[in-house]
């Protein structure tokens, strides 16, 4: 069965391609390599023994995208990752985000409709919940006004997909990720942040390897047990597995309605200090960090209610925080060894 993975050379996309190939799916990756490297295709081939097909083009381009879909009309499903994801940059350059994340989605949905491709798994985010009133957060918690254009593109994308599925023959599973971290155990694929990372774990590993002077901990005066903010960190390989399970649910006609939403997290909140402590434990290093003011736009705490995903998908995150920080550290060391 042929599956299109957009953004398949990116962080979550590449891990998902590995899991798809392990389950025997034939994968075609489309990526414009704006935030990833072509080497990822080789590394996927090294891990799995199978080289996915790769096409480089921009899904924002309606003509190229339409021609691609016409040629690939035997696709069974699309897992759509390709999008910009830097929250801070999206505040500075909102049109870049709206144009890229929404035009590409619209072009893909048009391609699906024109070529009778029925199934889409979409990469969404827990950012749609903002600071939820109730924790753990369930899928039916209210979507709150987005705090950034990036977050807004995820909300609008969910709405576009839902609207399309009312009249077109399109089924979708929207996966709301909590905080994906870690890397494949082979240390051959992982997160490759462009420039200075915004996210916690790449910043920690880059500090430890000597690329950054110190980690800035954004606030330790939150009303949480140790004062630092809490997130639900999930291992990227657990997340990747969930995509394959969601895809099989679709292809086996097990969906209960045309659009389904699942939270993908571990159900356990960890503070910034707990992540640092875990990193220090698995690496045997002391991390250089300083406590700073809170980062504007950050929420205090969020973690997933995983009951629905556990029950309906039969999926559960298996890896703990130490697995996540250790695999991220091994990946950073492998990158340093290459350069
Ligand atoms: C946010 C979004 C998420 C989005 C992701 C993409 C929310 C709830 N989440 O994740 O949807 O996909 O960005 O980038 O809006 N921290 C530090 N120092 C650092 C970096 C981070 O202390 O140098 C802290 C943050 O304050 C936060 C935690 O670490 O408490 C995690 O931050 P980060 O990795 O940036 O992810 P989110 O902001 O949760």
Image (cartoon, rainbow, N blue to C red):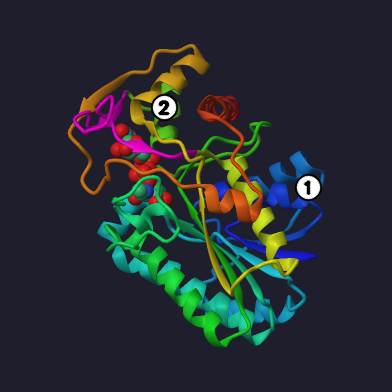
Of the image marks 1 and 2, the number of the one nearer the N terminus: 1
Q: Considering the numbered disc 2 on the image, is that residue within a helix, a strand or a loop?
A: helix
Q: Which mark is residue 153?
A: none
Does 52 sit above or below residue 57? above
Q: Main secondary structure of the magenta part?
A: loop
Give the position of the N terminus as an image quadrant.
bottom right
Q: Which residue is mark 1?
A: 22
Percent coordinates x, y for residue 281 in the rendering? 48, 15
User: Which residue is drawn at the image coordinates 34% and 36% (left, top)?
Assistant: 230
Q: 259 or 125: nearer the eye?
A: 259
155 in relation to 49, above or below: below
In this view, 109 is above or below 199 = below
Q: Is residue 9 visible?
A: no
- Residue at 64% x, 54% y: name it: 313
Residue annotated with mark 2: 275
Task: Decide if ligand 1 comes within 8 Å of the CB at mark 2.
Answer: yes
* Whole-percent x, y for residue 212 in the image: 36, 27
The answer to whether one can see residue 209 in this image is yes
Question: On the rendered image, what quadrant is the C terminus found in?
Answer: top right
- Tell which quarter ligand 1 is in: top left
The residue positioned 63% from the left and 79% from the top of the image is 112
Q: Secondary structure at mark 1?
A: helix
Decide if residue 69 is on the left or right side of residue 308. Answer: right
At horizontal 58% and vertical 70% (from top left) the residue drawn is: 172
Would residue 208 be found to the left or right of residue 113 on screen? left
């Amino acid at each position: 069965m042929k599956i299109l993975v957009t953004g398949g050379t990116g962080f979550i996309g590449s891990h998902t391609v590995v899991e798809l190939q392990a389950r025997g799916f034939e994968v075609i990756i489309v990526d414009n390599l704006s935030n990833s490297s072509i080497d990822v295709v080789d590394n996927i081939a090294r891990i799995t023994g199978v080289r996915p097909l790769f096409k480089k083009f921009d899904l924002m381009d309606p003509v190229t995208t339409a021609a691609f879909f016409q040629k690939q009309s035997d696709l069974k499903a699309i897992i759509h990752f390709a999008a910009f994801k830097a929250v801070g940059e999206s505040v500075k350059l909102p049109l870049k985000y709206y144009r890229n994340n929404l035009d590409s989605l619209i072009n893909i949905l048009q391609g699906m409709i024109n070529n009778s491709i029925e199934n889409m798994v979409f990469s969404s985010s827990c950012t749609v919940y903002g600071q939820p009133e109730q924790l753990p957060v369930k899928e039916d918690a209210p979507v709150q006004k987005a705090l950034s254009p990036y977050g807004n593109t995820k909300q609008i994308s969910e709405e576009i997909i839902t609207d399309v599925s009312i009249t077109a023959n399109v089924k979708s599973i929207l996966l709301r990720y909590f905080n994906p971290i870690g890397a494949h155990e082979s240390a051959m694929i992982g997160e490759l942040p462009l420039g200075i990372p915004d996210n916690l774990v790449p910043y920690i590993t880059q500090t430890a390897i000597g690329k950054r002077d110190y980690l800035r901990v954004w606030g330790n005066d939150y009303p949480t047990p140790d004062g630092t903010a809490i997130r639900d960190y999930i291992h990227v390989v657990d997340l990747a597995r969930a995509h394959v399970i969601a895809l099989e649910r679709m292809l086996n006609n097990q969906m209960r309605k045309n659009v389904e939403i699942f939270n993908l997290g571990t159900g356990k909140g960890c503070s910034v200090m707990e992540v640092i402590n875990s990193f220090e434990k698995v690496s045997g290093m002391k991390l250089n960090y300083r406590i700073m003011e809170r980062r504007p736009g950050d929420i205090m705490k969020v973690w997933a209610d995983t009951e629905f995903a556990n029950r309906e998908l039969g999926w559960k995150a298996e890896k703990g925080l130490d697995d996540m920080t250790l695999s991220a550290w091994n990946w950073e060391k492998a990158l340093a060894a290459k350069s």
